[in-house]
Amino acid sequence: MRDRSRRTLALAVFAYGAVTSGAAWGEEGGRVHQGRIVRIAAGPTYLHESWHPSAGTGDAVHTGWGPALDVTVGKFVRPRLVLAGSVQAAAIIDRDETTLGMTYALDDTIHFVDTLAALVDFYPDPARGLHAGGALGLAFVTEVDTHMGGSQTSWGPVAALHVGWERFISRRWSAGGMFRLSLYHYGTDTPPPEAASNGLLVTVLFAFTYD
Amino acid sequence: MATGGGSVWVPLSCALAVAAIGCGGNPPAVFVGESAHFRLYVDPALMPLPAAFDGDNALAALETEWADVATMLKTPDCKITYYWYTPEHIGIACDDTTEGGCTKEAEMEIDAPLLPDAHELNHAYTYLRSPRRPVPFLAEGMAEAIGCGYEAPIPAPFDADWREAIVELRSDKVYGLGGLFVRQMIRRYGIDDFLRYYEQSPERRDPALFAANFESFWGVALDDLWADFTTVVPGVPFVDQKICPCSLPPITPDADVVTDPARVPYWTLPDVGDGTLAFTAGRYQAASVRSCAGDTDAVSGKAVMTRLGSGAGWYVMAPLAAVQTGAFVAERCADATHYTLSPDVLVGNPYLTVTIPATQASTVYLAIDVPFPLDGMKVAGADAVCPTCDFDQNACRTLTRTTTTPVTGNFYARLQYDSSDSEREYGVVATQDLTFSR
């Protein structure tokens, strides 16, 4: 067996082992989250946002990385179902702009994408710690030019899907990971012309949940 | 440079104190006085000031600049605190050793190594009009756009992409391309429309947004206009100097020329009809006749003769020794008004410059009086040189431009002008020089 195949197999075995051991721990401990929960999560996020001015001039695509922070407060309204409110803040630092085939680094800028959403999280088997869900809400997008000192905030709808896994690390705390896709849309008219933006945030979060 | 950063607060009591030195964090400066629009402090290292800027003259120079530029920008009344520092102290005042001057807009303070410093003053004026912060490409471009005199704008790297200049903060692209852009826009659309555009422009360094906003406002793509701005027409010199408001009074020919650079840094040219204005520079100086729009090369020389009709769109820098009007540049030799050569003509460069509007083919004559002893002096640059108006005699044969002809006293010169089609289309003035040597 070649080295690459061997590494892939080892990784798969490790991942399976981690999931099954976590599930086993949950089953063995019989511990599941219940009642009110608070989840705090942080991790890197990647932005891909397209910008379309109404005048038909050159579109632009903005891409970049930054940190994201997420706080979710909710409650198990059913044994497997959480209803929550979620606040996420993402700051894309020094993103790139591609327009007319050329890419320009927007140095000394921060592109904040902050979302406020109602969230549904479903645990198909709470003892295994796997969960998935979605959110609907509002995105507040703020452009900051740290050199110029100016900022401008726009807002629009956001929809997000996530999937995650968690295992208990103490009696009331669990730790895990989440993968989230957030789609948002907003419009601007200052400065002219009117323009529409569609954004996608891909976020990997390290999450801690408390009940 | 314009900054929105913090500045030194100069307390009123401190400002009013005798020799208010060392107040705040700026390098020490002496409070000189206050005028309608300025409060002036001067670096002690610059003291005593030269006579032209001593007493009230420095404030007068600032007020003259204010009034002149206000005819374009319609600047609202306000007080600007102006610190005139040595170049060595500017870096400290601006909190950046690489800076050559700065405007602290929020405090309406200028720290500059010149007085008046047109670049920094333009920053202050535009901020007074509208307290906002356009992208550096526009803000620095605007600061580089307006000015009268010898200070050339920062050159534009023609092959650079204007979009790169939009995202940058401080570079030759920002200052050079920004200045080129703003000057060309003002020339094409006028200052009022340009200011309307400037005051609604994006405050974020985003090339796509800048392009879209431009097209939204002007109805034309910036890429198309940019190509036009940077196209060099064959046979037509590409000239892009600063734009001068040219609101100061015209010079009075044949009268004593008063030298007061604080209040009269330049004169506009009067309408002398078909006559010629002859400007003579002071000893070891040069006269400089310049285009208000900054789109034509300056005409310089120990003596400058211009036959530019109404004179509109031109100004001449101070100081001058004399200005005369007459038929110094004449269609017929016999009609030429005699011009007396300055004794220090040999140290001029060029020596005697003659400018007329673009022409398909023109022959003009000069009558030059030489009131000083000649010791083997030669003249070059004329089509023919003759001791009399009889250019048919053998001694007055046609010359090449580089042929030197000995002159032994007063002489007449014949000049031939022949502008190309493109020079006539673009209205490029026709200039020829007479050079003198031994």
Image (spheres, coloured by chain):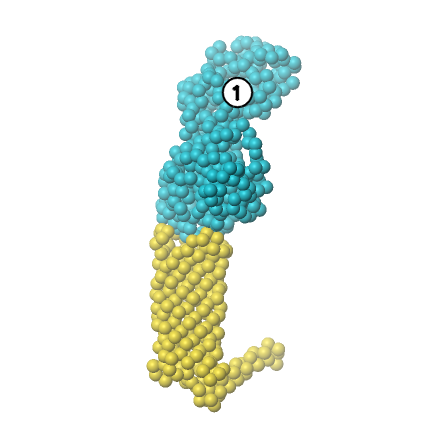
Q: Which quadrant, please, contains the C terminus of chain B?
A: top right
- According to the picture, the residue beneath numbered tag 1 turns out to be B321
Q: Colour of chain B?
A: cyan
The chain that appears yellow in the image is A
Q: Nearer the viewer, residue B40 or B263?
A: B40
Q: Is residue B321 above or below residue A51?
A: above
Local packing at callout 1 (Cα closer than 10 Å; few below 14, some 14-19, many 20+) is some
Closer to the camera in the image, B37 or B69: B37
Q: Residue at x 41, y 50 (%)?
A: B202
Residue at 44% across, 78% down? A209
- Residue B148 is situated, as x and y percent measured from the top left of the image, at 48, 32
B24 or B257, nearer to the observer: B24
On screen, B313 above or below B124? above
Percent across and percent down for residue B307 are 46, 21
Taking B426 as reference, is B95 above or below it? below
Secondary structure state at the residue bearing disc 1:
loop
Q: In the image, what residue type sits under mark 1? A: Ala
Q: Quadrant of residue A164?
A: bottom left
- Can I make out residue B240 in this image? no
> How far across and down, in percent of the image, does residue A68 sit?
46, 67
Number of numbered markers: 1
Residue B40, image x, y percentages: 48, 37
**Observer able to see residue B35:** yes
| Residue displayed at 47% across by 20% down | B277
From the viewer's perspective, is B140 left or right of A2? left
Residue found at x 35% / y 63%: A156
Subunit ID for the residue under disc 1: B
